[in-house]
Amino acid sequence: MAMRPEFYITDLLILSLFIIFIVGASYASCYEHLRAPWRRVFKKKIAVVSAIVLSVFIAIGLLDSIHVRLESQLTSGVSITNTKSVLDLLLAPLDDTHETSYSAPFASKAFTLTTETSAAGQATRLYKPLQYVSHYTLPGQKLTWVVVANMLYIALESLLLVLLVSTALLYFRAKRQNTPLVSVINRYLKNQNQFPWQTALLTGFIMLFMILVLFHFSRYCHIFGTDKVGRDIFYTTLKSVRTGLIIGTLTTLIILPFATLMGVAAGYFGGVIDDVIQYLYTTLSSIPGVLLISATILSVQIYMARHDELLQTTQQRAEIRLLVLCFVLGLTSWTSLCRLLRAEVLKLREMDYVQAAKVLGAGHYTILMRHLVPNVMHIILITIVLDFSALVLAEAVLSYVGVGVDAATYSWGNMLNGARLELAREPVVWWPLLSAFSFMFTMVLSANLFSDAVREAFDPRAI
Amino acid sequence: MVTYLVRRLLYAIPVVVGVNLFTFALFFMVNSPDDIARAHLGNKYVSEKMIANWKAQHDYDKPLFINQARQGVAKLTDTLFFIKSIRLFAFEFGMSDGGRDIGADVRQRMLPSLMIAVPVLLLGLLTNITIAMLMTFFRGTRVELVTSVMCIAMMSVSTLFYIIIGQYVVARLLRLVPISGYSDGWFALKFILLPVVISVVAGIGSSARWYKTIFIEEIYKDYVRTARAKGLSELKVMLNHVLQNAMIPILTGIVVIIPLLFLGSLLMESFFGIPGMGSYTIDAISLQDFAIVRVIVFLGTLLYIFGLILTDLSYILVDPRVRLD
């Protein structure tokens, strides 16, 4: 079986975004004035909790953004290629396991009746047993005790892991500050850093425990059930994390350079440039958002149907559509950022330090890049963080309207969309809705709480 | 003030023209009319003749900007650009790709849309301002903390989820109202009740929080302290002073969307089967009916610009300091 990495364009973008984030973070950690607001953020318990929860989602999304192409030879000599992400490989048989249709969480039999005709020609209606179920207990063992024992074991495991990871983090910190590890730990224990480390440890432990428990049970059965075409819901929900993350982050990333440049230029230069840029964003923002998005997506859809040959696989097509969606969503949301930046720069350019730079003979480029852009960074940051959750929620609505992500893409929007019909069934199929809801809610809620803390720390207006 | 209005209207013209050009480019230059025809007739097994027929039926067989085959003014008027774009300015919407009169459809569907949108706006305003005032009144206490957290939690839930669960619990389990549908007159009440309530509930999270920040900003100003120093009760201060002054930023946010109410709500109308503009838009999108989508984009833009002008006018009403000239 041959294996080689494959990168979709969305993968590249999200990975490069992650690298930018890492570089930016380590750059910021070198300067006290950049670190201070972040320290304010992480003094809050709620911010720490939501940051840890968010980073779990980000980790899932990143694992799902590294793809490998697997080539395997069938016995007949035909070779087939399969593109899988690291997450697929981790969750492995789940991505290939297909039941026939719905099955409830933890069920061992299908949810719907099937008619089977025996060799004698006699038709019987029965709930067919599922393919992907294995025995949790050995014969003679009591289920409760096995579950309790396993839970305890996992709890111990996650406790050790959390301690290991935090010690490693502290070790690196100590090494950077050239102080012994013991004194760093002491500083935390005495709460000199005002970092709520108890909360952080507890959250880390709970998250890890939950991940391991879910993973543990997912080895034995469909823990969240299966959907209409028999896909495992746990798998589908986890795959949707990546879509949500991409929509939430790439959209802002795509428009950011554009909006910053336009906003800052409009505010700084004024005159004709200001007029043109203002006209541009007024025009675009006067088209109601959903309509602009649907109009653009409709056009792109037809364009893609016409130029079939450009894209080989359905997955590539879905990825491109996802990217287009990000782009279009960005098109509708850059105007507000641009307007904010313009207003701020209008104020800033009259400041003494900008005037001084001008008098000293600094060129436009220097003034823009060294004096203006760094001073509007907090607005940009707040916008990125605030927009994230709104964009994740928007994806669901757009998927319902029919202009969201491709139907083949795993997304919470598509899951919620299907839930409407599933709730109308008798008996009710509730598990796809519940799992999509709980994952989406957790991610959006923690993003909202985190952005709240960030805004309070960075916004000079908020006291 | 009249000169101000005239100037605002004049400013609006290039914007509307810009939008029109943009949508025209999006619909006719990214994709040729051939592509649109093919999308409607199905991509496979379509002969050239069928495409030509479809295009002729729907006026898509004209050249884009200049028709060389015609004489005089017709050279410019008998083109796609004139028929599909310029005529919108005269509110001649023409036929949809499905062959219906768009103008008549729009007129018919505005009322049901308003039946939902107007109560949602008013009820929502009332609820959200009340909640926000309560939060401001109890600022710094546990009541505020709990309400704030509730608001953040409520705004983290997808609107789709509110609708799906609301419809399931109220209409299916409790059978209090019909699941979906619409009728004229007083019977409409039982159909619009649920969508209105769900819309209001779904909006509480973000709006109440936004109003709260506005109120909090006001409450630390000098005139509030003066009012308290005069011996007014906190309740009177809130209602008579803070609320009135906070109305300005609230109005800016609200007035701009009032004209857009005509476009209805995409989600509510399609979930609850209400024959309004929102469901019209969704149907047009799923049928890929470009003619309708184009008309709605145009209408939406006009209404939005109208809303901006209304916002300026509403300033005069609530703030005597503002003069427009």
Image: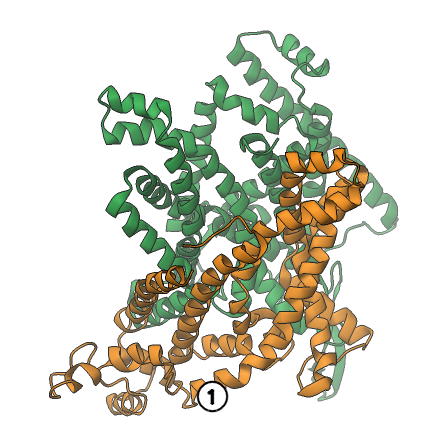
Q: Which chain is green?
A: A
Q: Is B311 above or below relative to A429?
A: above
Depth order, front residue of B183/A325: B183
Look at the image and give the colour of chain B.
orange
Task: Identify the secondary structure beneath mark 1.
Answer: helix
Depth order, front residue of B209/A381: B209
Q: Residues within 10 Å of mark 1 (few under 14, many from 20)?
A: few
Residue A77 visible to the viewer: no
List the residue tagged with mark 1.
B104
Q: Position of residue A376 (x, y in %)?
A: 42, 34
Residue A352 visible to the viewer: yes
Q: Is A295 above or below relative to B325?
A: below
Depth order, front residue of A125/B304: B304
Q: Position of residue A83 (x, y in %)?
A: 44, 54
Please tell me in which quadrant of the rendered image residue A311 appears. Answer: bottom left
Q: Position of residue B100 (x, y in %)?
A: 43, 90
